Amino acid sequence: MTKNKSNTVNLVTGGAGFLGSHLIDRLMNKGEEVICIDNFFTGAKKNLVQWFDNSNFELIRHDITKPITLEVDRIWHLACPASPIHYQFNPIKTAKTSFLGTYNMLGMAKRVGAQFLLASTSEIYGDPEVHPQPESYRGNVNPIGIRSCYDEGKRIAETLSFDYKRSHNLDIKVARIFNTYGPRMLPNDGRVVSNLIMQGLKNESMTLYGDGKQTRSFCYVDDLINGLIKLMNANLHGPINLGNPKEITIIELAEIISKKLNISEKFIFKDLPKDDPLQRKPVIKEAKDNLNWTPLVDLDQGLEKTINYFKNL
Ligand code: NAD
Ligand code: UDP
């Protein structure tokens, strides 16, 4: 495959998934070229069908644990299942995707001199003992638990990225993404926003794990994609937190969603999954100061758009 010198050629791994497909929409709308690699484990062609007739777009069914040779300028490395039920479905595969997949993509970046952005995660902080979490916090991760395939997978992916920078002077960027939600989340991916909305729409009880007092901070997808693009364009390596610092408990989220759906609150409490972090909120000073990035969509607006998406499925 030859590279069109007149235009930026982007490779988006995991581009058929939730975040990847929104990123591709943005890059395509800017008139850039995009190659998407996906094995369709949690992604779907329907997220990209709007670009199938556009000659700037190519879709490759490929598993990134296997090497591939392409000529590109920028690699946006998102491929990895992100919801607990999906990354725990085959944990060894998740670890392979995180290590071998990242290794293969960094190898490609080195060979062609491409910029490389890793979609890392707040999970690298584990169940944090420092609150809120700045980038300097090194985390509290269980290395042998049910979330470890993902948490430790992303930690080694960060390590690999920085070792490629130190050893080969690669222009790497690491984004630590906090809980993000919006249209194109899978209705059955088990994540809290999709679960509670779907349960509410079906008039079922909303499942709350533990006492529901654990916290998360939810970022709307458009804000997150803005942050990723700003990071790729900046002379910065990170790691950098990208997330909305507005922190709420899971019960509060369920109450807000019930109100928005105009239904009476019906909750059922279930056991808290092992190693489920009790609190999570990003410090985003680095992103504000260095990328001039801050989330703009509040939870109210974001949930409205997300609920409309699920209603129309
Ligand atoms: P997603 O599951 O919707 O997307 C992941 C995509 O990667 C899917 O299309 C899947 O089919 C593909 N994929 C998985 N394994 C692959 C493999 N071995 N080879 C090729 N393709 C593969 O998840 P998402 O929410 O869009 O997350 C995208 C990235 O962002 C992930 O790396 C995730 O860890 C990171 N992230 C997401 C969030 C969030 O809240 N959504 C938070 C933190 C980090
Ligand atoms: N959660 C819940 N009910 C659900 C799904 C999730 O109470 O139906 C909780 C889960 O235990 C966690 C929080 O909501 O404390 C966020 O879960 P999610 O899987 O969305 O994200 P992550 O745990 O990866 O941050």
Image: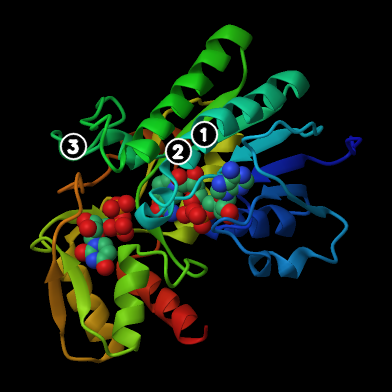
Sequence-wise first label, 3 or 2: 2
Mark in the foreground, 3 or 2 = 2
Q: Quadrant of residue 247?
A: bottom left
Whether residue 81 sits left or right of residue 43 in the image: it is left
* Mark drawn on residue 92: 2
**Labels 1 and 2 touching (C-beta < 8 A):** yes
Label 3, label 2: how many angstroms apart (C-alpha)?
A: 24 Å
Report how many numbered discs are placed on residues in the image. 3
Which residue is situated farthest in the top direction here? 167
In the rendered image, residue 79, in percent from the top left (x then y), is placed at: 56, 44
Secondary structure category for the residue under label 3 = loop
Label 1, label 3: how many angstroms apart (C-alpha)?
A: 25 Å
Residue that appears at 45% across and 41% down: 292
At label 3, the amino acid type is Pro
**Labels 3 and 2 touching (C-beta < 8 A):** no
Residue that appears at 22% across and 69% down: 253
Mark in the foreground, 1 or 3 = 1
The yes-or-no answer for disc 1 within 8 Å of ligand 1 is yes
In the rendered image, residue 10, in percent from the top left (x then y), is placed at: 73, 42
Secondary structure category for the residue under label 2 = helix
Residue 13 vs residue 248, the one in the foreground? 13
Residue that appears at 61% across and 30% down: 116
Position of 307 relative to 220 (above/below): below
Q: Which residue is mark 3?
A: 128
* Mark drawn on residue 96: 1
Q: Quadrant of residue 123?
A: top left
Residue 229 vs residue 308, the one in the foreground? 308
At label 2, the amino acid type is Ile
